[in-house]
Amino acid sequence: MDEQTVSSRDREVFVEVKELWKIFGPGAENLLDSEVRFASKEEIQEESGCVLGLRDISLEIYKGEFFIIMGLSGSGKSTLIRCFLRLVEPTTGEILVDGEDVCRYDKSRLMGFRRHKASMVFQHYGLLPHYTVLDNVAYGLKVRGTPGGLLGRISDFVPLPSLGRARPSTSEEAGGVDAGPKLLTKEQRYRRAREVIETVGLKGWEDYLPGSLSGGMQQRVGLARALATDPGILLMDEPFSGLDPLIRRQMQDELVELQDRLHKTIIFVTHDLYEALKLGDRIAIMRDGEIIQIGSPEEIITSPADDYVREFVQDASPAKVLTASSIMKQPDVLLYEWEGPKTARQMLRSAEREHAFVVNKNRRLLGLVSRRELSELIERGGKSLREIVHEDLAAGRPDMLVEELFPLATSSPYPVPVLDENGRFLGEVGNRTILDSMIQDKGESEDV
Amino acid sequence: MFEFPDVLRIPLGDWIDLLMRWVLKHWGPFFDTVGDFLLQVLIYVERFFLWLPWPLVVAGVGVLAWRTMGSWLNGLVMAAFLVLIGTFGYWDMAMMTLAIVTSAVLISLVAGIPTGILMAWSDWVESLVRPVLDAMQTMPSFVYLIPALMLFGLGKVPAVFATIVYAVPPVIRLTNVGIRQVPRSVVEAAEAFGSNRWQILFNVQLPLARPAIMVGINQTTMMALAMVVVTSMIGARTLGLEVLLAINRIEIGRGFEAGLSIVILAIIIDRITHALAARQQQAL
């Protein structure tokens, strides 16, 4: 767990939300100035007639992170994800993407942001029913305009300046449409669209209308459309919740695979805990417009912030979430290869252990010795532990799920050693530990 | 017993008269110019329809009906109907009627569809335009003849003007409804990809509203045709004039022939535009 926190601290913050509020209804501004804003959602509604959408949301999302926003319906998760594109206008607060506040963008810069930096996959697909799959996928590229195209020139109020890290400047605003990045001709757009269609596995369906496709395939089109613009941020609003379970699992697997290749920053909304645990690097849990807890799947499972989260996660099987590194223990006895048999036997005896792992001076695992064999070794006058070491041990890695450790543990009478990629010994997981982790009260395992 | 007190009388009629007089006095030349221009256009349209060789028109309508309605029998029936009008001796009259109806419908669409779009975009515009449309549709159609007559005199121009006022509401309403019915999720997705208002209009809203708009065009056309008889009272030379004359002279046979010709025109136009609208619906 420590390792994970360290690595995420090293990563670059890409999206930062600061004190974001959304209140629906007239007089929202006044409400924010009064103390009523801290009242419960129901009280606010009674008092002012306004509906609280989001309350004081602050979070950071790292580059390349798969970030989950989870909550039940009405928790504000869909409102929050819409704020990133300002499909819902936040009442106050900041959303910094790459250091720029999306909330302060004017109309043309917002258009540019939507066209180039972020795109969204919708629960109900939101495909254009009169466009073919190909045209749907190319749509995000089409609205950017054609190089030198008349329609693009007329229909864009202001041309789009480059949307890198550049700050708005007068020279950029003066630039023509041609100054904008990545304007593609129709053929180029279609070529790109075909590439992405192949990526999502829809090759051969380019000329069909969305209405003739199954739900899963329609969502592939939605995903392809979002990927076609090569956005830095991929927003996904319950993309798989309309699909039946089998297709859903398949799509989740494919998304994981895709993310391994593309390394997008993904913000993913779901109400499905398993989906969240399976996909997310970190999860934010929302209730009544507030974030209750942000953490890795393990943290959420092992140390729920409050009863609400505890209830939420209580059905989750720890075996699917907990990793070897979080349940492994340092053994009572660890033998070095140069130790004499008698010392070794003495150490085992005093620790009341039957076997112990043997490592070399770099803590690389050599194998395992048992007390009985140690005694035999001493009787026949052997000098080195190496003579009796069992080398053929099934070893686990620190990021293995308990679920995956289980078969290793049951296949041998010994504890499972956990090794890093260099074969160094990190700790052991006993059969008891595995079973305990699966049934124990989740509050306890954090101090392991 | 309780007679309504005279004191409470609001002289709305007098005010309207005053307004009309004021408009005529100060805007007379403007309407004259507009009227003259419109007349030139209408004359050209009429000449075009009269120039069309009748076999071409019959064949054209037949093929169009066949293609849109999907059966060659339909095409044949429609073509035969058209020939029937010719046998009554009303071919030229029918073409002149079509010229006026076509002009009125085209102008109605040019004015009506953008109005419908504005209504769909803004609740404020909708609440403003809706009662006007209600009034336009419930007002007896004869009422439009008077201001049309005063502004444009006798003839085709006031006829087209009155026809537009009477026939434009359906296309406005259905454009509005059609756009408002486009699923929010589709529009939102288009917005999310950075479409501006025009891109959403042309890529999403109008294509998805097209079936509704086609129904609106169909209704507008039918109402324009229905107005033909009425406008003949202010001197438009159409089949309606024949009906009017027949009524005045109590010539039942002549009235029947002219009336039947109008019905035939109505059926042909209705069936073809209706089939077009239905095909749009299916395409989605």
Image: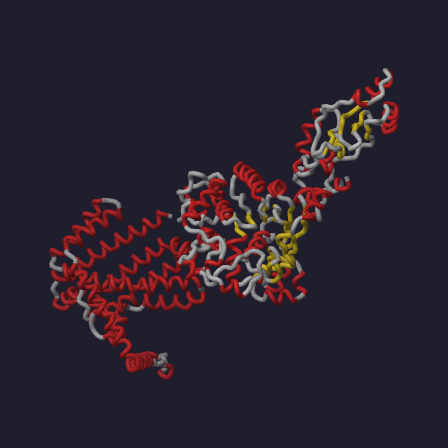
Q: Give x and y (percent) for residue A388.
A: 79, 20
B14, above or below B259, in the image: below
A441, above or below A384, in the image: below
Report whether A412 appears left or right of B161.
right
Q: Which image quadrant is residue B105 in? A: bottom left
Q: Is residue A434 visible?
A: no
Residue at 55% over, 47% down: A238
Q: Which image quadrant is residue A399 in? A: top right
Q: Give x and y (percent) for residue B165.
A: 30, 67
Report whether B16 appears left or right of A145.
left
Viewer-closest of B88 and B30: B30
Q: Is residue B80 visible?
A: yes
Q: Which image quadrant is residue A409 in? A: top right
Residue at 23% over, 57% down: B266
Q: Give x and y (percent) for residue A233.
A: 56, 50
Quarter placement of the N terminus of chain B: bottom left
Residue at 32% over, 49% down: B279
The residue sitting at the bottom extreme is B7
Viewer-closest of A343 and B19: A343
Viewer-closest of A358 and A104: A358
B208, above or below A378, in the image: below
Viewer-closest of B74 and B108: B108
B133, above or below A275, in the image: below
Q: Give x and y (percent) for residue A223.
A: 51, 45
